[in-house]
Image (spheres, rainbow, N blue to C red):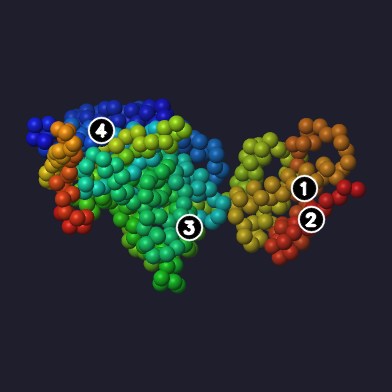
Amino acid sequence: MAMTNPAKRVTQGQFSFLPDLTDEQITAQIKYALQNDWAVNVEYTDDPHPRNTYWEMYGMPMFDLKDPAGILMEINECRKTFPEMYIRVTAFDNAHGWEAPRMSFIVNRPSREPGFRLHRQSRNGRNIGYSIDAYAADKPEGERS
Amino acid sequence: MSDTETSENALSQDLEILPDDAAVDLQAEFEKSQVQEVLDKLDNELVGLVPVKTRIKEIAALLLVDRLRCRFSLSSETPTLHMNFTGNPGTGKTTVALRMAEILHRLGYVREGHLVSVTRDDLVGQYIGHTAPKTKAVIKKAMGGVLFIDEAYYLYKPENERDYGGESIEILLQVMENHRDDLVVILAGYKDKMDKFFESNPGMRSRIAHHLDFPDYSADELEQIADLMLADQSYKLSDCARRALSEYIPIRTGLPHFANARSIRNALDRARLRQANRLFASGNKQLKKEDLITLTEEDFRASRVFLDGKLDGDLADGTMNEIKIDNS
Protein backbone atom coordinates (compact mmCIF):
# COMPACT_ATOMS: atom_id res chain seq x y z
CA MET A 1 0.00 0.00 0.00
CA ALA A 2 2.85 2.33 0.75
CA MET A 3 3.70 2.58 -2.91
CA THR A 4 0.21 3.31 -4.17
CA ASN A 5 -1.06 5.35 -1.24
CA PRO A 6 1.88 7.21 0.29
CA ALA A 7 -0.31 9.39 2.51
CA LYS A 8 -1.78 6.23 4.05
CA ARG A 9 -5.30 7.53 3.56
CA VAL A 10 -8.34 5.71 2.39
CA THR A 11 -9.45 7.17 -0.92
CA GLN A 12 -13.17 6.67 -1.43
CA GLY A 13 -15.78 8.97 -2.83
CA GLN A 14 -15.29 12.52 -3.95
CA PHE A 15 -12.37 14.74 -2.93
CA SER A 16 -10.57 11.90 -1.18
CA PHE A 17 -7.20 12.68 -2.80
CA LEU A 18 -7.44 16.26 -1.56
CA PRO A 19 -6.62 17.42 1.95
CA ASP A 20 -9.61 17.04 4.31
CA LEU A 21 -12.39 19.50 3.53
CA THR A 22 -12.94 22.34 5.96
CA ASP A 23 -16.41 22.85 7.43
CA GLU A 24 -16.86 25.78 5.06
CA GLN A 25 -16.06 23.62 2.04
CA ILE A 26 -18.37 20.89 3.32
CA THR A 27 -21.14 23.47 3.71
CA ALA A 28 -20.63 24.62 0.13
CA GLN A 29 -20.84 21.05 -1.17
CA ILE A 30 -24.02 20.35 0.81
CA LYS A 31 -25.49 23.60 -0.44
CA TYR A 32 -24.99 22.33 -3.97
CA ALA A 33 -26.74 19.07 -3.13
CA LEU A 34 -29.68 20.89 -1.55
CA GLN A 35 -30.02 23.17 -4.54
CA ASN A 36 -30.52 20.05 -6.62
CA ASP A 37 -33.17 18.72 -4.23
CA TRP A 38 -31.10 15.75 -3.17
CA ALA A 39 -31.69 14.20 0.24
CA VAL A 40 -28.52 14.36 2.30
CA ASN A 41 -27.60 11.85 4.99
CA VAL A 42 -24.69 11.23 7.29
CA GLU A 43 -23.18 7.73 7.52
CA TYR A 44 -20.36 6.18 9.51
CA THR A 45 -18.36 2.97 9.62
CA ASP A 46 -15.17 1.54 11.07
CA ASP A 47 -14.56 -0.84 8.17
CA PRO A 48 -13.07 1.02 5.22
CA HIS A 49 -13.06 -1.97 2.85
CA PRO A 50 -13.99 -0.61 -0.57
CA ARG A 51 -16.72 -3.25 -0.99
CA ASN A 52 -18.34 -2.20 2.28
CA THR A 53 -20.92 0.04 0.63
CA TYR A 54 -23.61 0.01 3.29
CA TRP A 55 -22.43 2.26 6.08
CA GLU A 56 -24.46 2.86 9.24
CA MET A 57 -26.77 5.83 8.96
CA TYR A 58 -26.44 8.47 11.65
CA GLY A 59 -29.96 9.60 12.51
CA MET A 60 -32.62 9.90 9.85
CA PRO A 61 -32.10 10.90 6.24
CA MET A 62 -32.84 14.61 5.97
CA PHE A 63 -35.51 15.67 3.52
CA ASP A 64 -36.91 19.14 2.77
CA LEU A 65 -33.96 21.05 4.13
CA LYS A 66 -33.16 24.48 2.75
CA ASP A 67 -29.93 25.28 4.48
CA PRO A 68 -26.76 23.24 5.09
CA ALA A 69 -26.42 24.40 8.70
CA GLY A 70 -28.71 21.64 9.95
CA ILE A 71 -26.67 18.95 8.23
CA LEU A 72 -23.40 20.39 9.48
CA MET A 73 -24.90 20.24 12.97
CA GLU A 74 -25.62 16.55 12.43
CA ILE A 75 -22.10 15.94 11.07
CA ASN A 76 -20.55 17.54 14.13
CA GLU A 77 -22.72 15.47 16.42
CA CYS A 78 -21.68 12.32 14.58
CA ARG A 79 -18.02 13.38 14.86
CA LYS A 80 -18.48 13.81 18.58
CA THR A 81 -20.08 10.38 18.92
CA PHE A 82 -17.69 8.49 16.62
CA PRO A 83 -14.45 10.49 16.49
CA GLU A 84 -12.40 7.44 15.45
CA MET A 85 -14.59 6.29 12.59
CA TYR A 86 -15.02 7.13 8.96
CA ILE A 87 -17.94 9.50 8.41
CA ARG A 88 -19.27 10.39 5.00
CA VAL A 89 -21.99 12.59 3.60
CA THR A 90 -24.17 11.14 0.86
CA ALA A 91 -26.63 13.01 -1.32
CA PHE A 92 -29.37 10.85 -2.79
CA ASP A 93 -31.20 11.84 -5.95
CA ASN A 94 -34.74 10.45 -6.04
CA ALA A 95 -35.46 11.67 -9.57
CA HIS A 96 -36.86 9.01 -11.86
CA GLY A 97 -34.08 7.33 -13.76
CA TRP A 98 -31.43 8.26 -11.21
CA GLU A 99 -32.65 6.95 -7.85
CA ALA A 100 -29.08 6.74 -6.69
CA PRO A 101 -26.52 8.63 -4.63
CA ARG A 102 -25.16 11.52 -6.64
CA MET A 103 -22.55 12.70 -4.19
CA SER A 104 -20.57 10.98 -1.46
CA PHE A 105 -17.53 12.27 0.36
CA ILE A 106 -15.65 11.55 3.57
CA VAL A 107 -15.85 14.22 6.27
CA ASN A 108 -14.10 12.42 9.13
CA ARG A 109 -11.29 9.85 9.40
CA PRO A 110 -9.77 7.97 12.31
CA SER A 111 -6.47 9.39 13.53
CA ARG A 112 -4.66 6.23 12.39
CA GLU A 113 -5.44 4.55 9.09
CA PRO A 114 -3.49 1.31 9.02
CA GLY A 115 -4.52 0.44 5.47
CA PHE A 116 -5.10 -3.00 3.95
CA ARG A 117 -3.44 -6.40 3.91
CA LEU A 118 -3.09 -8.08 0.53
CA HIS A 119 -3.87 -11.80 0.47
CA ARG A 120 -2.43 -13.94 -2.28
CA GLN A 121 -4.11 -17.27 -2.73
CA SER A 122 -2.46 -20.01 -4.77
CA ARG A 123 -5.01 -21.73 -6.93
CA ASN A 124 -4.98 -24.54 -9.44
CA GLY A 125 -2.02 -24.46 -11.74
CA ARG A 126 -0.05 -21.33 -11.19
CA ASN A 127 -3.05 -19.02 -10.77
CA ILE A 128 -3.09 -16.55 -7.91
CA GLY A 129 -6.23 -14.99 -6.38
CA TYR A 130 -5.98 -11.63 -4.69
CA SER A 131 -8.08 -10.12 -1.94
CA ILE A 132 -7.64 -7.39 0.62
CA ASP A 133 -8.50 -7.01 4.30
CA ALA A 134 -8.73 -3.80 6.28
CA TYR A 135 -6.41 -3.92 9.28
CA ALA A 136 -8.87 -1.59 10.97
CA ALA A 137 -11.45 -4.40 10.93
CA ASP A 138 -9.15 -7.07 12.35
CA LYS A 139 -10.85 -7.20 15.72
CA PRO A 140 -14.49 -8.14 16.12
CA GLU A 141 -17.02 -5.36 15.94
CA GLY A 142 -17.35 -3.54 19.26
CA GLU A 143 -13.74 -4.18 20.25
CA ARG A 144 -12.24 -1.95 17.60
CA SER A 145 -10.96 1.37 18.89
CA MET B 1 -33.03 31.53 -6.99
CA SER B 2 -31.97 34.70 -8.78
CA ASP B 3 -33.81 36.73 -6.17
CA THR B 4 -31.70 35.18 -3.44
CA GLU B 5 -28.53 35.86 -5.25
CA THR B 6 -29.19 39.51 -6.00
CA SER B 7 -30.16 40.38 -2.48
CA GLU B 8 -27.23 38.48 -1.06
CA ASN B 9 -24.85 40.22 -3.37
CA ALA B 10 -26.41 43.55 -2.59
CA LEU B 11 -25.31 43.36 0.98
CA SER B 12 -22.23 41.23 1.02
CA GLN B 13 -20.22 42.50 -1.92
CA ASP B 14 -18.26 45.18 -0.10
CA LEU B 15 -17.88 44.06 3.43
CA GLU B 16 -14.21 44.90 3.83
CA ILE B 17 -13.48 46.95 6.94
CA LEU B 18 -13.65 50.67 6.31
CA PRO B 19 -11.19 53.19 7.71
CA ASP B 20 -12.34 55.28 10.68
CA ASP B 21 -12.90 58.46 8.66
CA ALA B 22 -14.89 56.83 5.84
CA ALA B 23 -18.52 57.78 5.34
CA VAL B 24 -21.40 55.48 4.54
CA ASP B 25 -24.72 56.46 3.06
CA LEU B 26 -27.51 55.12 5.23
CA GLN B 27 -30.16 55.92 2.65
CA ALA B 28 -28.26 54.22 -0.15
CA GLU B 29 -27.69 51.17 2.00
CA PHE B 30 -31.37 51.09 2.87
CA GLU B 31 -32.40 51.22 -0.77
CA LYS B 32 -29.89 48.58 -1.67
CA SER B 33 -31.39 46.20 0.86
CA GLN B 34 -34.86 46.55 -0.76
CA VAL B 35 -36.46 46.43 2.67
CA GLN B 36 -38.79 49.30 1.83
CA GLU B 37 -40.54 47.04 -0.65
CA VAL B 38 -41.42 44.59 2.10
CA LEU B 39 -42.46 47.35 4.48
CA ASP B 40 -44.74 48.77 1.79
CA LYS B 41 -46.23 45.37 1.24
CA LEU B 42 -46.84 45.11 4.95
CA ASP B 43 -48.55 48.50 4.92
CA ASN B 44 -50.79 47.59 2.02
CA GLU B 45 -51.68 44.09 3.11
CA LEU B 46 -52.34 44.77 6.74
CA VAL B 47 -54.79 47.36 7.96
CA GLY B 48 -54.03 49.14 11.22
CA LEU B 49 -51.51 47.45 13.54
CA VAL B 50 -49.62 50.71 13.88
CA PRO B 51 -47.55 49.75 16.94
CA VAL B 52 -46.46 46.51 15.29
CA LYS B 53 -45.49 48.21 12.05
CA THR B 54 -43.54 50.87 13.92
CA ARG B 55 -41.72 48.21 15.86
CA ILE B 56 -40.83 46.31 12.71
CA LYS B 57 -39.48 49.46 11.12
CA GLU B 58 -37.43 50.03 14.25
CA ILE B 59 -36.04 46.53 14.10
CA ALA B 60 -35.22 46.93 10.41
CA ALA B 61 -33.46 50.23 11.16
CA LEU B 62 -31.51 48.67 14.01
CA LEU B 63 -30.34 45.80 11.84
CA LEU B 64 -29.33 48.13 9.06
CA VAL B 65 -27.34 50.35 11.40
CA ASP B 66 -25.77 47.25 12.89
CA ARG B 67 -24.60 46.23 9.43
CA LEU B 68 -23.01 49.62 8.94
CA ARG B 69 -21.34 49.38 12.35
CA CYS B 70 -20.00 46.03 11.27
CA ARG B 71 -18.26 47.66 8.36
CA PHE B 72 -16.31 49.86 10.73
CA SER B 73 -15.63 46.70 12.75
CA LEU B 74 -17.47 48.18 15.70
CA SER B 75 -19.43 45.14 16.74
CA SER B 76 -19.40 41.69 15.28
CA GLU B 77 -21.91 39.97 17.51
CA THR B 78 -25.07 38.81 15.81
CA PRO B 79 -27.96 40.53 17.52
CA THR B 80 -30.57 38.32 19.14
CA LEU B 81 -33.51 38.31 16.79
CA HIS B 82 -35.85 35.84 18.42
CA MET B 83 -39.29 37.35 18.79
CA ASN B 84 -42.52 36.87 20.58
CA PHE B 85 -45.83 37.86 18.98
CA THR B 86 -48.75 38.13 21.34
CA GLY B 87 -52.28 39.04 20.43
CA ASN B 88 -55.78 37.77 20.08
CA PRO B 89 -56.68 35.39 17.28
CA GLY B 90 -56.93 36.83 13.80
CA THR B 91 -54.74 39.86 14.41
CA GLY B 92 -52.23 38.99 11.69
CA LYS B 93 -49.42 37.33 13.61
CA THR B 94 -48.67 34.72 10.95
CA THR B 95 -48.72 37.23 8.13
CA VAL B 96 -46.35 39.53 9.97
CA ALA B 97 -44.03 36.59 10.70
CA LEU B 98 -43.95 35.82 6.98
CA ARG B 99 -42.98 39.42 6.18
CA MET B 100 -40.46 39.41 9.00
CA ALA B 101 -38.70 36.43 7.43
CA GLU B 102 -38.52 38.37 4.20
CA ILE B 103 -37.11 41.47 5.90
CA LEU B 104 -34.47 39.48 7.76
CA HIS B 105 -33.53 37.77 4.53
CA ARG B 106 -33.14 41.04 2.66
CA LEU B 107 -30.96 42.39 5.42
CA GLY B 108 -28.88 39.23 5.30
CA TYR B 109 -29.64 37.99 8.80
CA VAL B 110 -31.11 34.73 7.60
CA ARG B 111 -29.73 32.98 4.55
CA GLU B 112 -32.86 31.56 2.88
CA GLY B 113 -35.76 33.54 4.32
CA HIS B 114 -38.32 30.74 4.40
CA LEU B 115 -40.86 30.38 7.18
CA VAL B 116 -41.48 27.04 8.85
CA SER B 117 -44.74 27.24 10.75
CA VAL B 118 -45.24 24.60 13.44
CA THR B 119 -47.38 23.88 16.48
CA ARG B 120 -46.91 21.61 19.47
CA ASP B 121 -47.79 18.51 17.46
CA ASP B 122 -44.82 18.98 15.16
CA LEU B 123 -42.33 19.37 17.99
CA VAL B 124 -43.42 17.08 20.79
CA GLY B 125 -43.38 13.32 20.45
CA GLN B 126 -45.70 10.70 21.86
CA TYR B 127 -43.30 8.46 23.75
CA ILE B 128 -39.94 8.67 25.46
CA GLY B 129 -37.16 9.37 22.98
CA HIS B 130 -39.52 10.57 20.28
CA THR B 131 -39.41 14.27 21.09
CA ALA B 132 -35.74 15.07 20.54
CA PRO B 133 -35.45 13.76 16.97
CA LYS B 134 -38.79 15.33 16.09
CA THR B 135 -37.83 18.74 17.40
CA LYS B 136 -34.41 18.51 15.81
CA ALA B 137 -35.86 17.57 12.42
CA VAL B 138 -38.07 20.67 12.54
CA ILE B 139 -35.16 22.85 13.59
CA LYS B 140 -33.02 21.52 10.77
CA LYS B 141 -35.77 22.32 8.30
CA ALA B 142 -36.06 25.85 9.63
CA MET B 143 -32.33 26.56 9.53
CA GLY B 144 -31.45 29.46 7.31
CA GLY B 145 -34.95 30.81 7.86
CA VAL B 146 -37.53 31.53 10.50
CA LEU B 147 -39.17 28.99 12.81
CA PHE B 148 -42.67 30.15 13.71
CA ILE B 149 -44.18 28.34 16.68
CA ASP B 150 -47.88 29.05 16.86
CA GLU B 151 -49.58 28.80 20.24
CA ALA B 152 -46.21 28.19 21.82
CA TYR B 153 -47.62 28.05 25.35
CA TYR B 154 -48.98 24.57 24.63
CA LEU B 155 -45.37 23.35 24.66
CA TYR B 156 -45.36 23.58 28.42
CA LYS B 157 -48.04 21.75 30.34
CA PRO B 158 -47.34 22.16 34.05
CA GLU B 159 -50.29 20.02 35.11
CA ASN B 160 -48.70 16.92 33.57
CA GLU B 161 -45.20 16.33 34.85
CA ARG B 162 -44.62 13.48 32.43
CA ASP B 163 -45.33 15.72 29.46
CA TYR B 164 -42.55 15.74 26.87
CA GLY B 165 -42.95 19.42 26.02
CA GLY B 166 -40.19 20.38 28.42
CA GLU B 167 -37.67 18.36 26.45
CA SER B 168 -38.64 20.21 23.32
CA ILE B 169 -38.25 23.56 25.06
CA GLU B 170 -34.77 22.59 26.26
CA ILE B 171 -33.63 21.74 22.75
CA LEU B 172 -35.13 24.95 21.43
CA LEU B 173 -33.35 27.00 24.09
CA GLN B 174 -30.04 25.40 23.20
CA VAL B 175 -30.50 26.05 19.51
CA MET B 176 -31.71 29.61 20.09
CA GLU B 177 -28.47 30.28 21.94
CA ASN B 178 -25.91 28.33 19.89
CA HIS B 179 -27.30 28.75 16.39
CA ARG B 180 -28.29 32.39 16.45
CA ASP B 181 -26.69 32.85 13.03
CA ASP B 182 -28.64 29.98 11.57
CA LEU B 183 -32.23 30.54 12.54
CA VAL B 184 -34.65 32.97 14.11
CA VAL B 185 -37.41 31.67 16.35
CA ILE B 186 -40.73 33.49 16.56
CA LEU B 187 -43.20 32.42 19.22
CA ALA B 188 -46.84 33.39 18.97
CA GLY B 189 -49.87 33.09 21.16
CA TYR B 190 -52.46 34.80 23.30
CA LYS B 191 -51.06 37.42 25.62
CA ASP B 192 -52.11 36.04 29.00
CA LYS B 193 -51.15 32.47 28.17
CA MET B 194 -47.79 33.52 26.78
CA ASP B 195 -47.10 35.55 29.92
CA LYS B 196 -47.77 32.48 32.02
CA PHE B 197 -45.55 30.44 29.69
CA PHE B 198 -42.66 32.86 30.14
CA GLU B 199 -43.16 32.94 33.89
CA SER B 200 -42.54 29.22 34.08
CA ASN B 201 -39.75 29.34 31.47
CA PRO B 202 -37.57 32.32 32.39
CA GLY B 203 -34.78 31.04 30.16
CA MET B 204 -37.08 31.43 27.17
CA ARG B 205 -38.00 34.98 28.09
CA SER B 206 -34.40 36.15 28.39
CA ARG B 207 -33.51 34.70 24.99
CA ILE B 208 -36.20 36.66 23.22
CA ALA B 209 -35.26 40.19 22.35
CA HIS B 210 -38.44 41.53 20.84
CA HIS B 211 -41.88 41.28 22.34
CA LEU B 212 -44.54 42.54 19.95
CA ASP B 213 -48.11 42.93 21.05
CA PHE B 214 -50.79 42.85 18.37
CA PRO B 215 -53.75 45.06 19.29
CA ASP B 216 -57.32 44.18 18.40
CA TYR B 217 -58.73 45.88 15.33
CA SER B 218 -61.17 48.76 15.66
CA ALA B 219 -64.54 48.57 13.90
CA ASP B 220 -63.31 50.89 11.13
CA GLU B 221 -60.26 48.76 10.55
CA LEU B 222 -62.37 45.63 10.39
CA GLU B 223 -64.49 47.26 7.72
CA GLN B 224 -61.39 48.10 5.72
CA ILE B 225 -60.26 44.51 6.10
CA ALA B 226 -63.64 43.33 4.82
CA ASP B 227 -63.20 45.60 1.79
CA LEU B 228 -59.76 44.18 1.09
CA MET B 229 -61.03 40.63 1.36
CA LEU B 230 -63.99 41.31 -0.91
CA ALA B 231 -61.81 43.04 -3.47
CA ASP B 232 -59.52 40.01 -3.42
CA GLN B 233 -62.42 37.71 -4.23
CA SER B 234 -64.07 40.09 -6.73
CA TYR B 235 -67.17 40.76 -4.67
CA LYS B 236 -68.67 44.06 -3.73
CA LEU B 237 -71.22 45.36 -1.27
CA SER B 238 -74.39 47.20 -2.12
CA ASP B 239 -74.87 50.41 -0.13
CA CYS B 240 -77.43 48.81 2.15
CA ALA B 241 -75.17 45.81 2.63
CA ARG B 242 -72.37 48.13 3.69
CA ARG B 243 -74.63 49.66 6.30
CA ALA B 244 -75.61 46.20 7.48
CA LEU B 245 -71.96 45.19 7.72
CA SER B 246 -71.02 48.22 9.77
CA GLU B 247 -73.89 47.40 12.13
CA TYR B 248 -72.86 43.76 12.17
CA ILE B 249 -69.24 44.34 13.20
CA PRO B 250 -69.83 45.98 16.63
CA ILE B 251 -72.43 43.33 17.53
CA ARG B 252 -70.12 40.49 16.49
CA THR B 253 -67.23 42.06 18.42
CA GLY B 254 -69.25 41.77 21.60
CA LEU B 255 -70.07 38.10 21.10
CA PRO B 256 -67.85 35.29 22.35
CA HIS B 257 -65.13 33.68 20.18
CA PHE B 258 -64.51 36.88 18.32
CA ALA B 259 -61.39 36.37 16.20
CA ASN B 260 -60.86 39.74 14.53
CA ALA B 261 -60.07 39.42 10.84
CA ARG B 262 -60.85 35.71 10.86
CA SER B 263 -64.40 36.35 12.12
CA ILE B 264 -64.86 38.89 9.37
CA ARG B 265 -63.71 36.41 6.79
CA ASN B 266 -66.14 33.85 8.13
CA ALA B 267 -68.98 36.37 8.08
CA LEU B 268 -68.19 37.18 4.46
CA ASP B 269 -68.00 33.51 3.59
CA ARG B 270 -71.45 32.98 5.06
CA ALA B 271 -72.78 36.01 3.21
CA ARG B 272 -71.47 34.49 -0.01
CA LEU B 273 -73.23 31.29 0.87
CA ARG B 274 -76.49 33.12 1.39
CA GLN B 275 -76.01 35.09 -1.79
CA ALA B 276 -75.59 31.89 -3.76
CA ASN B 277 -78.64 30.45 -2.10
CA ARG B 278 -80.64 33.61 -2.77
CA LEU B 279 -79.70 33.60 -6.44
CA PHE B 280 -80.62 29.97 -6.66
CA ALA B 281 -83.92 30.36 -4.90
CA SER B 282 -84.99 33.45 -6.80
CA GLY B 283 -85.69 31.27 -9.81
CA ASN B 284 -84.50 34.03 -12.08
CA LYS B 285 -82.25 32.20 -14.48
CA GLN B 286 -81.05 35.31 -16.30
CA LEU B 287 -78.22 36.54 -14.10
CA LYS B 288 -75.95 39.43 -14.91
CA LYS B 289 -72.37 39.87 -13.83
CA GLU B 290 -73.61 42.51 -11.42
CA ASP B 291 -75.81 39.94 -9.66
CA LEU B 292 -72.91 37.58 -9.23
CA ILE B 293 -70.56 40.05 -7.60
CA THR B 294 -72.95 41.98 -5.38
CA LEU B 295 -73.67 41.02 -1.80
CA THR B 296 -76.92 42.63 -0.70
CA GLU B 297 -78.33 43.65 2.62
CA GLU B 298 -80.39 40.51 3.11
CA ASP B 299 -77.26 38.37 2.80
CA PHE B 300 -76.03 39.98 5.98
CA ARG B 301 -79.32 40.63 7.77
CA ALA B 302 -80.16 36.92 7.70
CA SER B 303 -77.31 36.28 10.11
CA ARG B 304 -78.27 35.02 13.56
CA VAL B 305 -76.02 37.71 14.98
CA PHE B 306 -78.79 40.11 13.92
CA LEU B 307 -81.77 37.86 14.47
CA ASP B 308 -81.22 36.64 17.99
CA GLY B 309 -77.80 37.90 18.96
CA LYS B 310 -76.17 34.48 18.68
CA LEU B 311 -73.32 33.19 16.59
CA ASP B 312 -73.93 31.89 13.13
CA GLY B 313 -73.68 28.15 12.87
CA ASP B 314 -73.83 27.75 16.62
CA LEU B 315 -72.36 24.45 17.70
CA ALA B 316 -75.28 23.81 20.04
CA ASP B 317 -77.54 22.56 17.29
CA GLY B 318 -74.82 22.00 14.73
CA THR B 319 -76.72 23.70 11.94
CA MET B 320 -76.77 27.02 10.28
CA ASN B 321 -80.49 27.32 10.50
CA GLU B 322 -80.83 30.71 8.89
CA ILE B 323 -80.12 29.12 5.55
CA LYS B 324 -83.10 27.32 4.15
CA ILE B 325 -82.79 25.56 0.89
CA ASP B 326 -85.96 26.41 -0.87
CA ASN B 327 -86.29 25.23 -4.41
CA SER B 328 -89.99 25.52 -4.83
The label nearer to you, 3 versus 4, is 4
Please state which amino acid type lies under the numbered disc 4: Gln
- Compared to residue B50, the image places residue B322 above or below, namely below
Q: CA distance from mark 1 to mark 3?
A: 36 Å
Name the residue located 63 percent from the left edge and 52 percent from the top edge. B263
The label shown at residue B274 is 1
Q: Which residue is mark 4?
A: A14
CB within 8 Å, label 3 to label 2:
no
Q: Nearer the viewer, residue A36 or B191?
A: A36
| Rendering quarter of residue B196 | bottom left
Q: Which residue is mark 3?
A: B121
Name the residue located 30 percent from the left edge and 30 percent from the top edge. B12
The label nearer to you, 2 versus 4, is 4
Q: CA distance from mark 3 to mark 2?
A: 36 Å
CB within 8 Å, label 1 to label 2:
yes
Please state which amino acid type lies under the numbered disc 1: Arg
3 and 2 marks on the same chain: yes
Give coordinates of residue A45: x percent, y percent.
Answer: 24, 48
Q: Earlier in the sequence, mark 1 or mark 3?
A: 3
10 Å neighbourhood of mark 2: few (<14), some, or many (≥20)? few
Give coordinates of residue B152: x percent, y percent.
Answer: 45, 58
Secondary structure of the residue carrying tag 2 is loop
